[in-house]
Image: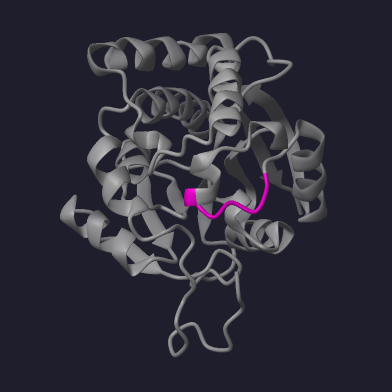
């Protein structure tokens, strides 16, 4: 991501290819990946909010995209969103989400110590300088506030969606912990997620490489009447992740705390 001298005067870089946002807006409500991920994320948000000494916490979703996660977060507090893409924010407005702003993750348009919870849900992997983005999340967190991160795991799982989304990297658990600590945050919990579909996703991406098959977006690869069932199966990991950490998975979840 290119830095800008003035966030209001200079054009903001696009973090995903333009056709990705309409696809996301169309499928986020029903595609098994998004449905299952929201169930897992909401379980973590519930636990975080329960540990905060703040009734009606103020929540910021960095890289809010077309707004589906922002709708979920609004059930837990006063949720606001920021995204680099004007098109993504237009979709948020279509959902009726008004409390959104345009801005870069590395230069968040918010004051210091403004939020109790900051989320970066499949966002940090987009940033040229992930540490700078995480430092900004820390800056806008109040002391004792938490950051909730969800990122893709393992470079050998690189696929079409990584290209379409202009990802810079996928992480290992050790990689993510390192950059989170470099940003001045204390890791409270970090685990792989989506162990359920690790093998089929790995196989599918290996087959795509071998055959050269490249769909416009992996988000288009739905499975018809099985979509709802797969979403429930993936989302069921929320219960397991309350008690155990997974040794591998398609993604990583991390909860980090601002300590002063």
* Residue located at (29% from left, 11% from top): 226
* Residue located at (33% from left, 34% from top): 220
Q: Quadrant of residue 9?
A: bottom left
157 in magenta: no
Residue 259 x %, y %: 74, 49
Residue 124 x %, y %: 61, 51
Asked if residue 142 is positioned above or below residue 201 in the image, the reply reads below
Q: Does the rendering let one see residue 234?
A: yes
Q: Quadrant of residue 74?
A: top left
Q: Does the rendering let one see residue 53?
A: no
Left or right of 8, for residue 189: right
In depth, the one of 6 and 127 nearer the eye is: 127
Magenta residues, start to end: 164-169
Outermost residue to the front: 211
Residue 116 x %, y %: 53, 49
Q: Quadrant of residue 196?
A: top right
Asked if residue 238 is positioned above or below residue 11 in the image, the reply reads above
166 in magenta: yes
For the C terminus, the image quarter is: bottom right
In depth, the one of 141 and 203 nearer the eye is: 203
Asked if residue 93 is positioned above or below residue 170 in the image, the reply reads below
Residue 36 x %, y %: 40, 22
Asked if residue 181 is positioned above or below residue 172 in the image, the reply reads below
* Residue located at (52% from left, 69% from top): 104
* Residue located at (49% from left, 72% from top): 13
For the N terminus, the image quarter is: bottom right
């Amino acid at each position: 991501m290119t830095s800008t001298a003035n966030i209001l005067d200079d054009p903001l870089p696009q973090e995903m290819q333009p056709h990705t946002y309409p696809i996301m807006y169309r499928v986020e409500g029903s595609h098994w990946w998004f449905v299952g991920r929201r169930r897992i994320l909401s379980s973590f948000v519930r636990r975080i909010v329960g540990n905060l000494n703040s009734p009606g916490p103020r929540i910021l979703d960095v890289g809010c995209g077309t707004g589906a996660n922002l709708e979920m977060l609004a059930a837990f507090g006063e949720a606001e969103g920021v995204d680099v893409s004007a098109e993504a924010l237009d979709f948020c407005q279509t959902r009726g989400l008004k409390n959104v702003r345009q801005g870069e993750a590395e230069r968040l348009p918010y004051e210091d110590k403004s939020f109790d919870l900051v989320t970066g849900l499949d966002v940090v992997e987009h940033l040229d300088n992930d540490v700078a983005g995480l430092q900004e999340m820390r800056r806008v967190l109040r002391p004792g506030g938490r950051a909730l991160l969800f990122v893709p795991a393992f470079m050998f799982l690189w696929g079409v969606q990584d290209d379409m989304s202009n990802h810079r990297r996928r992480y290992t658990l050790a990689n993510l912990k390192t950059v989170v600590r470099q940003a001045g945050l204390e890791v409270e919990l970090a685990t792989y997620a989506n162990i359920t579909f690790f093998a089929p996703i790995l196989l599918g991406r290996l087959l795509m490489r071998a055959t050269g098959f490249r769909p416009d977006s992996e988000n288009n690869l739905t499975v018809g009447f099985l979509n709802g069932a797969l979403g429930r199966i993936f989302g069921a990991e929320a219960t397991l992740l309350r008690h155990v950490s997974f040794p591998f998975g398609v993604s990583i979840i991390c909860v980090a705390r601002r300590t002063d």
